[in-house]
């Protein structure tokens, strides 16, 4: 393989990594900030991928409507989950119930869509930098959009009243209540908003990957790797790590072969957990607080 | 005081009667019923193992099939590939599981229980993908079979797994009543306080993981004898789900929880014979649904129906405050 092949692999990895960063920032926000352990997010991404496929290929809806549908459905799922499963902040039970819900979603999808892998089969135009180095337009657009969405989410959290309310509730519920914030409602909203990130990530991933019901497991794991490596509750770090992991996984499967992909990536995950469990981008002080 | 003594006597008689019934069970049962009983007792063992880790020590393992599967693979690989005996197979499973549990436990000892769950899922996926890809060693998705001389009759298998189940229950009770169990409960209820009182929570977490992994490994070694082969299905998430469901339905943190909860396994085995295979995904949906409903509405499990009122009320109050 020449140099251009490597550059192509890396470019592809960066674009995919942007999606990884987007979806794992949703997870890191839910678990790190809101303290709601949500192990369904892989299944939810898989579901929104299937929904995108369903809307665009089976119903033949226009792309805008399909996107709107996926986002609304995801928002509703988030709201319902918060209202039923995650009503009590009890980490252990949340882990169990969300794991159960993940299996429910996965097996319902398996029943309705069967295990046959689905693909949007988008015909992608490519931008050629040189005759050999190129990048797909949709991929690039998705990467840029992922960045824009994350930046705007961060801005929303930092600048708007609602965002500041969310952060206040996360930091200290009682005092936030005293300041006139309805903390339950704010948490509902925050959790549902993070599901929009999941929906958008799912739609974007659908343009690049074929989806099958087990894809959710893979996504869950990639999400863990990214969140742990970046450190929980660090959205920017999650995005950067997402790009890194995307490049790394593209290089592993491109150069060594796909057989090495899972063991190497998760071996790395374990090494990170052993050496720097509080994450690359977090300070030790923040992590030790919760034993 | 006298009353409580009398009650314990009554209980011992009940236990002995149950044990006698379990011992005499193979005489009355046909092959199909015996098969169901074997699987049920295996899940009781696995349930106790999960109960030790999650019900007692508060570390939520949602990929417990990892330890179980390693037990199965340790047994089959040792007897088939290395040509050693049954005992060596069991020991191999135990050794591999100890190493894996140490790895998971070391991770869990550094940070919160959430990291434990994540690490376990990551390792589970790694081991699962390795079990598919290392075809020379594990047989890939085809699996490898056990040597034929280790084929036991169903009655023998029943007694083996009954021994395992009773032993695991006794082990659970022993741990719960010893100082180790007190420490385990302490790090579930309030790790900060436990640490403040001088309990080395990291080491206790590692120990809990190792104990639980060893119990699951024994059940896995037995499953290899029952199945007479291995396949990658043993790492399946539905096995983890069944293990969790057995405990949650029965009652988390009680010895008799998994025993009561294993009634769900009996139901499953009975129903599965009648269902068309197209609806196979639905069995998992139903399990997960039962798990969610029980965890939300009755976290104390079936066992809370059998408890006396004065025992029930303080537990309830405690839960409401946390």
Image (spheres, coloured by chain):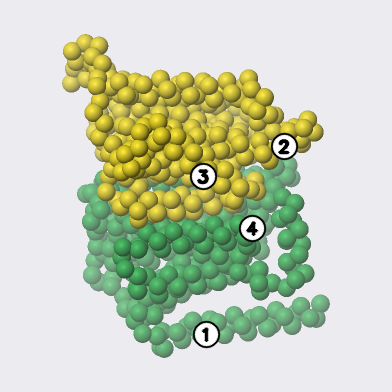
Chain colours: A yellow, B green
- Residue contact at pointers 2 and 3, CB within 8 angstroms: no
- Residue at the spot x=43%, y=45% of the render? A43
Q: Please report contact status of discs 4 and 1: CB closer than 8 Å, yes or no.
A: no
| Labels 3 & 1 near each other (Cβ < 8 A) | no
Q: Dot 4: few (<14), some (14–19), or many (≥20) neighbours within 10 Å?
A: many
Image coords of residue B41 (percent x, y): 46, 71
Label 2 vs 3, first from the N-terminus: 3
Q: Looking at the image, is mark 4 or mark 1 earlier in the sequence?
A: 1
Which residue is located at x 44 percent, y 59 percent?
B285
Query: Disc 4 on helix, strand or loop?
Result: helix
Disc assigned to residue A77: 3
**Mark 1 sits on what residue?**
B20
Q: Secondary structure at mark 2?
A: loop
Q: Are marks 2 and 4 on the same chain?
A: no
Q: Which mark is residue A182?
A: 2
Q: CA distance from mark 2 to mark 4?
A: 41 Å
Marks 1/2: CA distance? 59 Å
Q: Which residue is mark 4?
A: B181
């Amino acid at each position: 393989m020449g140099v251009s092949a490597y550059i192509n692999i890396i470019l592809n990895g960066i674009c995919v990594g942007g999606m990884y960063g987007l979806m794992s920032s949703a997870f890191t926000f839910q678990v790190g900030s809101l303290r709601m352990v949500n192990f369904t997010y892989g299944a939810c991404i898989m579901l929104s991928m299937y929904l995108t496929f369903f809307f665009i290929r089976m119903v033949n809806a226009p792309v805008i409507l399909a996107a709107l549908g996926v986002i609304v459905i995801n928002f509703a799922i988030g709201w319902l989950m918060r209202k039923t499963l995650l009503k009590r902040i009890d980490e252990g039970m949340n882990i169990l119930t969300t794991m159960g819900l993940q299996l429910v979603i996965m097996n319902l999808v398996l029943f309705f869509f069967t295990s046959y892998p689905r693909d949007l089969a988008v015909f992608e135009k490519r931008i050629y930098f040189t005759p050999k180095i190129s990048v797909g337009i949709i991929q690039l657009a998705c990467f840029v959009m992922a960045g824009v969405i994350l930046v705007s989410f961060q801005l929303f959290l930092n600048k708007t009243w609602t965002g500041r309310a969310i952060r206040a509730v996360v930091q200290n519920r009682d005092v936030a209540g005293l300041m006139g914030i309805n903390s339950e409602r704010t948490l509902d909203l925050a959790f549902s908003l993070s599901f929009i990130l999941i929906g958008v990530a799912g739609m974007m991933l659908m343009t690049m990957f074929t989806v099958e019901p087990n894809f959710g497991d893979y996504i869950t794991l990639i999400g863990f790797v990214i969140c742990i490596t970046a450190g929980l509750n660090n959205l920017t770090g999650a995005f950067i790590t997402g790009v890194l992991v995307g490049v790394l996984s593209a290089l592993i499967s491109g150069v060594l072969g796909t057989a090495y992909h899972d063991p190497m990536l998760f071996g790395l995950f374990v090494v990170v957990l052993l050496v720097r469990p509080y994450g690359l981008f977090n300070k030790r002080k923040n992590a030790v607080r919760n034993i | 005081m006298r009353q409580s003594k009398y009650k314990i006597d009554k209980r011992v008689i009940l236990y002995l009667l149950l044990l006698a019934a379990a011992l005499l069970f193979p005489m009355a049962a046909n092959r199909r019923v015996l098969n169901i009983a074997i699987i049920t007792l295996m899940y009781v063992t696995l349930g106790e193992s999960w109960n030790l880790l999650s019900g007692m020590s508060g570390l939520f393992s949602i990929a417990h099939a990892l330890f179980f599967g390693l037990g199965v693979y340790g047994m089959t690989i040792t007897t088939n590939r290395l040509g050693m005996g049954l005992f060596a197979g069991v020991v191999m499973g135990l050794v591999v599981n100890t190493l894996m549990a140490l790895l998971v436990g070391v991770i869990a000892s550094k940070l919160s229980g959430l990291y434990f769950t994540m690490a376990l899922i990551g390792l589970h996926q790694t081991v699962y993908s390795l079990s598919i890809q290392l075809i020379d060693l594990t047989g890939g998705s085809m699996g490898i079979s056990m040597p034929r001389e280790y084929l036991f009759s169903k009655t023998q298998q029943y007694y083996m797994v009954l021994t395992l189940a009773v032993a695991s229950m006794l082990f659970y009770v022993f741990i719960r009543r010893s100082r180790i169990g007190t420490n385990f409960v302490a790090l579930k209820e309030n790790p900060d306080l436990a640490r403040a009182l001088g309990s080395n929570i990291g080491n206790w977490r590692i120990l809990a993981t190792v104990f639980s992994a060893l119990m699951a490994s024994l059940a896995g070694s037995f499953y290899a004898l029952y199945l007479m082969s291995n396949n990658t299905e043993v790492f399946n998430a539905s096995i983890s789900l069944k293990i969790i469901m057995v405990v949650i339905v029965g009652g988390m943190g009680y010895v008799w929880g998994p025993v009561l909860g294993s009634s769900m396994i009996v139901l499953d085995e009975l129903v599965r014979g009648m269902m068309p295979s197209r609806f196979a995904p639905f069995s998992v949906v139903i399990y997960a649904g039962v798990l969610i409903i029980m965890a939300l509405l009755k976290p104390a499990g079936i066992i809370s129906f059998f408890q006396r009122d004065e025992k029930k009320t303080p537990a309830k109050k405690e839960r409401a405050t946390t």
